[in-house]
Amino acid sequence: MKLQFRRLWLVVHRWLGLTAGLVFVLIGLTGSLLVFDHAIDEWMHPQLLLTEGTGERKLLAEIIDAANAGYQGDSTGTKSEALAVVRPRIEQGVWTVWFSGGTKEKPEFIAVYVDPYSAEVNGQRAWGTDPMGIIYRLHFRLLAGMFGGLAVGIIGVVLLVSLVSGIVLWWPLLKGGLRAALAIRRGSRFNYDLHKTVGITTALFLLVITFTGVYMELPFIIKPVLNLVSAETKPPKDMKSGEASERQPLTADEAIAIAQKQFPGAKFDHLHPPEGEEGVYEVAFRQEGEIQTSFGRSQVYLDQYSGEVVYMHAPNQFTGTDHFVAWQFPLHNGEALGIVGRWGVFVLGIAPAILYVTGFLLWYRGRKSRQKQKNRRAQVASV
């Protein structure tokens, strides 16, 4: 029974690896690049994403006005007001002001880049059209939109099974001792030893990265299960500012100053200007201790006229589901463990390629061996 069970796991592991494994290679290698996507993007497009300016920085209100004035519109030439403003990523970075455009069937998000010292527009581009954006779309959705995202999620589930089957197949090797189970020998056993050693030493980490990827692709399947334990906290949809009554709305800088009082010492991250006369400001900060360094989750929603706090959400108010959701992306790209975690994920992205190549060679060698045996039996039978 144990032998039959092992053979079954071997068949499962082999064919899942040979089929879904090729997509795993693609996702792994693109994921390695995306660990440092912003730095690579800045290196490739310094004129757009970096500044050589010095001195006093312009007010955020001036940055938004400059972006609104310099925005050239979407692919159809249609213009809109700024949707979001994101702080410079690094000291030499520029402000990113986002606009929405396109159609309902084919929406676009256009980034306008503004120099923080001169308030001059460096340029604009639609998300996903630059090299790193294309790599992100390839990693996230195989360049196939929502259908591609669904496919990646399903393949991720298949790969979770493949990884578990690999652990099951490796486990009996421990009977010979840990050293033997992890040994990589030369000669005819090299591919086998490299496959099983790389596989088992990366399996736990690949399980975590793959699961987080599955969650981000298929949240509509996982979140209902999480909500059985605790509900996810979401800002109310009916938030409105009071009547204007000829009052002037707050500037972006005034809104940040008011919101900052709710989180003293926190670092400003991004801002959503009010949409229309009834819209509210959303000001987001990142507090010390937040697990995600690339996105602030301490949010303050303000009446755009009075500055009154309409709603506030911060990690110390998170439910269990909120914490679970907040951990997914930082675990996926390694930022949860700082620079060590990022480099770790970068290296792990190469592991699927090693596993696929060695696994394919093992299968191919076994196939040739079985074919030779079949030919010998045929020759014997014909004598």
Image (cartoon, rainbow, N blue to C red):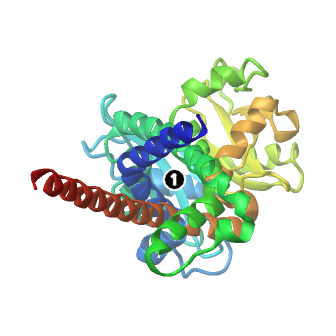
241 over 293 or under it: above or below: above
Quadrant in the picture for the N terminus: top right
Three-letter code, disc 1: Val
Q: Residues within 10 Å of mark 1 (few under 14, many from 20)?
A: many
Residue pushed farthest left? Answer: 382
Q: Is residue 148 visible?
A: yes
Q: Quadrant of residue 327?
A: top right
81 over 42 or under it: above or below: above
**Residue 229 picture location, percent across and down:** 78, 21
Q: Quadrant of residue 358?
A: bottom left
Residue pushed farthest front? Answer: 383
**Residue 192 picture location, percent across and down:** 49, 66
Residue under the image location 45 percent in, 57 percent down:
112
Residue under the image location 63 percent in, 81 percent down:
54
**Residue 232 picture location, percent across and down:** 72, 26
Quadrant in the picture for the C terminus: bottom left
**Residue 22 picture location, percent across and down:** 37, 54
Residue under the image location 60 percent in, 42 percent down:
211
Residue under the image location 49 percent in, 48 percent down:
98
Task: Write down the residue under mark 1.
Answer: 97
**Camera-side residue: 237 or 359?**
359
Q: Left or right: where does residue 377 sit relative to residue 260?
A: left
Q: Is residue 241 visible?
A: no
Q: Left or right: where does residue 245 sit relative to residue 151?
A: right
Judging from the image, what secondary structure is the residue with disc 1 in?
A: strand
Q: Quadrant of residue 307?
A: top right
Q: How many marks?
A: 1
**Camera-side residue: 346 or 2?**
2
